[in-house]
Every structure is written in C-alpha cells, then in structure tokens.
Image (cartoon, rainbow, N blue to C red):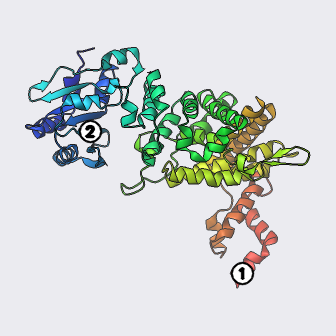
Amino acid sequence: MNQLPVKTALSRLGRAFDRLVELKADRRLFLVGGALRDLALGKDPADFDFAVSGSGIRFAADFARRIRGRLVVLSEDDDEARVVWHRTLTFDFNGFGNRTIADDLSRRDFTINAIACEILPEGVSELLDPYAGQEDIGRRLIRPVSDSSLNLDPLRLLRGMRLALELGFELDAAILRQGESVSLNHTAAERIGMELLRIMEQPGSSRFIEDLVRLGRLREILPALGDLLDDADLRRHTLRTYRKIEETIAAPGFFGRFQPEWAAYFDQWTSGEEASEADQPDPAKAAGLPFRRALLKLAGLLHDLAKPATRFTTTKGEVHFYGHDSLGARRAAEMARDRLRLSRPQVKMLRTLVQEHMRLHLLATAPDLSERAIRRYFRDLGPEAFGLMILCYADGWATAGRTIHLEDTITRMLEQKRAEDAIVKVRRLVTGHDLIALGLKPGPAFKTILEELENLQLEGRIKTTEEGIAYLRTAMPGLFAESDA
C-alpha cells in the first residue's frame, strides 16, 4: 500500500497542481488525510487536504487568485481555508505555523487521516505514516491517533461515527471510551448540525444514535430531549421509531409499489432556490448530500418530544398526552434552529412532520375515510405528505408492530393520489386565469375556489370549463356580484 498513485492523482489537476508547486516556494506543503485515504481505497479523490508551513489562510488566498477559484475561510482560529475550483474540486489548507509536520499529524483525529506526503519540485516524497494509518485502512478501522484525540476536539466523536458509516469501517472501541468523558457543550452548533445530519443521512446510523444516548451526548446535542430520554418507555419507543424509519428507507416493503413517488420525495431538496454565499450555510447541502432522509429520521427522534410535559392521568388511571404534537413541533423547531443551526426550509420540514405525526393515525381509524379527506391531506402537507406516511408507519410499528389497517390506508391514499394526479395533469378544467377573465380579483379565496372545482372535476361532477363556471355562478353568486360592482 506504500506505492499509492499520488503523483498520478495530482497530475490530473493540471495547472492547479502547477500553481501549487510554484506557490509553495520555500514553504513546506504536504498532501494529507482524505485524498491519500481515498487513493488507498482505490477511489479518485475530489477533495484534497493540504498542511502548509506558515499561514494556511494566506496560502489558500494566493492559490485561489492564481487558479481563479473561490475562497472560503473555514476557521480563522484553526487557520483553515477552502478553495473551490470548477464547482467539482475542493482544496483545503491548514497552516501548521512554525511546527513540524510530525507535530501536525500528532494532532489529527484518526490514524487513517494522519498520513502525509510532501509536495516537492520534482514530485512527491515517500509517505509519512507514523500511526500505521495504512494498516488501519486495510483493517477498515477508524482509530484515534492518541488517547487525547477527542479532548482536542470533542466533535471527533461524531466525525468518527460519520466516517465509519460513509466508508463502511468499524469504529474503534477507544473512540467510544473517550466519548464517555468529553462534552459537546462548547462545540459550535453549526459543526454539530453538519455532522449529525451527515450521520443520519447514512444507512445503519441507528446504532450510533443509540451510542450517543448511552454516552449522554445526545442530550447535550438536543437538550430538550432530556426528559424523554429519562423515561424508559418513551426512550425505547423513540429509538424503535428511528430504527424502523431507517429500515423502511433501506427496504421499502409495501411502499416499494410507489417507487416514482418514493424517488420524487427523497430526491428533492428542502429548498427550491440556490442559496447565496451570504445565506445561512445549509449543512447537508454543504456536504453535497440530499438531506430528506436525515431530517425524516430526526423527526422520528423528536416526534414525541413533548410527551413528558403533556402527560395527563385521569381519575381512572388513563394516560393522555393532549397537545404533545403542537408543543413538540414548537420545541423541535427551536432546537433545530438554535442547537443545530439548520436552515429555514429544514426547520419548516421538521416542524411540519412533528406537528402532523398523529394525522395519519386519525385518518386510518376514521369510520369512513372520504376521498376529499385524502385530497385535503395531500394539499395540506404538500411535499411532506409522503415522508409523513413513513414517519407514521414507523411510529405505529414501534407501538404495536405491523398494522395491516394502517398499511391499507396508506396504500389507498397513494393509489388515489396517483390516479388523480394523472387526471389533473392532463387538464385542469378551471384555472386562475379563467377566474381573472371572469373579472375576479386574485386573492386568498382563489385557492379555496380552485380546490373545490378540482374536487368536483375529480368526482366527475363537472366535465368542462363551462360546467365549472356555471357551478360557480350558481353556488357562489356573491363572487360575481362583487366583480360586477
């Protein structure tokens, strides 16, 4: 493994690598960490990490100017900066000042990231691997560089979990042992939010969420969960719900009959707009990942957040949690915004899922579920209608195991939605333009009017535009009296 194709990988960078060599001059520049790890795993790296003597931010700024890349300062305290080139390649630079590369490697997180080779005018040096990182790559093991690794940066606990999931590696027991005594209370919320979402985005994350509960770290990350985690029954139910969401995403089961809807839901971003650089950073988008899976799992963790605060026991000994959905939604939104620094679209998605997590159970137990009620569900929930079905299914399963009636209700709702979408997609009989042509002024009432006309169209009660307009004149004559005036 000592003969990694480092020079070949760097030569593919073309003029960017040439500028690096020119710029380094009398400074020492080392390729470190992830790119070498990827090469050892047979992957082509798209991210290159460098350690440089002197100032990392100043070196990155000079490099960005020479290749016309975009500079992003990651941390002034840690002297870290990133250069983005052609939107597909990133170069991270960390300055190690007057220290040696040996000192720099000794302060890194894991052995697989504590490998380096020096960039020289004639090529690259032999690999420096003082902590047997190549051996750990071969063993597929995430191992800390030292016994104090997590003390230097407690976030390394989450980073180790995330890397284990992304790479398919095992997490060394020493990391969990160190995780018992460190605290995340003083770690920046943005960093925690990014790592937590990236953990949750991966399959198999439930085992690490359970580790975070056991270590006491999850209540540091999400302190409003504290009372729930202290209740054995609620804690067990919450973790079962999370696990079932994850299992369903991995193996959709009966949801698999609705693959187009499934793909459409999970392939969406929670924001339809490109954020400017000045906007609040979106952790999952910054990581290059879709994030609906992570947020759906996070909703599974938070859906019963307010049950301890709303517990009510009747004189007959019956226990109720009236209003736990609304109170939980508010608290979940506050925690997502303040503790994880999630973006507004992410907070909105999470709040909706927690607020509405009882809705499908109520529909499934209704004596007569009407087509209009199903239509209203999809209209009210919008893009989160499908995700809420997965959350409610997992919630029900965690409570009582498999519930055929709930599966049948979800199936019926999705089948109706699919059939009606096909009808409306062909042609909506009456549109907002038709209403304006009739002299009506656009406003909040338009939505109600158009929804009612769509109901009538789908029920077969109107079959032409003229019939729709005639219905309006008969059923809502006041509208036209106002427009005529």
- Residue at 16%, 47% (x, y): give it: 62
- Residue at 36%, 18% (x, y): give it: 137
Q: Judge whether 278 appears above or below 36 on screen.
A: below
Image quarter where the N terminus lies is top left
Q: Nearer the viewer, residue 32 or 114?
A: 114
Q: Nearer the viewer, residue 91 or 439?
A: 91
Quarter-wise, where is residue 364 in the image? Answer: top right
Classify mark 2: helix, strand or loop.
strand
x and y percentages locating residue 299 in the rendered image? 62, 43
Quarter-wise, where is residue 361 in the image? Answer: top right
Q: Judge whether 326 appears above or below 144 on screen.
A: below
Give the tally of numbered discs. Answer: 2
Q: Nearer the viewer, residue 107 or 450?
A: 107
Kindly tell me whether residue 169 is visible in this rendering.
Answer: no
In the shown orientation, is residue 385 left or right of residue 347? right
Q: Which residue is mark 2?
A: 91
Q: Which residue is mark 1?
A: 482
* Mark 2 and mark 1: Cα distance apart in space: 63 Å
Amino acid type, mark 2: Phe
In the shown orientation, is residue 216 left or right of residue 401? left
x and y percentages locating residue 88 in the rendered image? 32, 39
Amino acid type, mark 1: Glu
Give the crowd class for mark 2: few <14, some 14-19, many >=20 residues within 10 Å. many
In the shown orientation, is residue 396 left or right of residue 388? right
Nearer the viewer's eye, disc 2 or disc 1? 2
- Residue at 42%, 38% (x, y): give it: 155
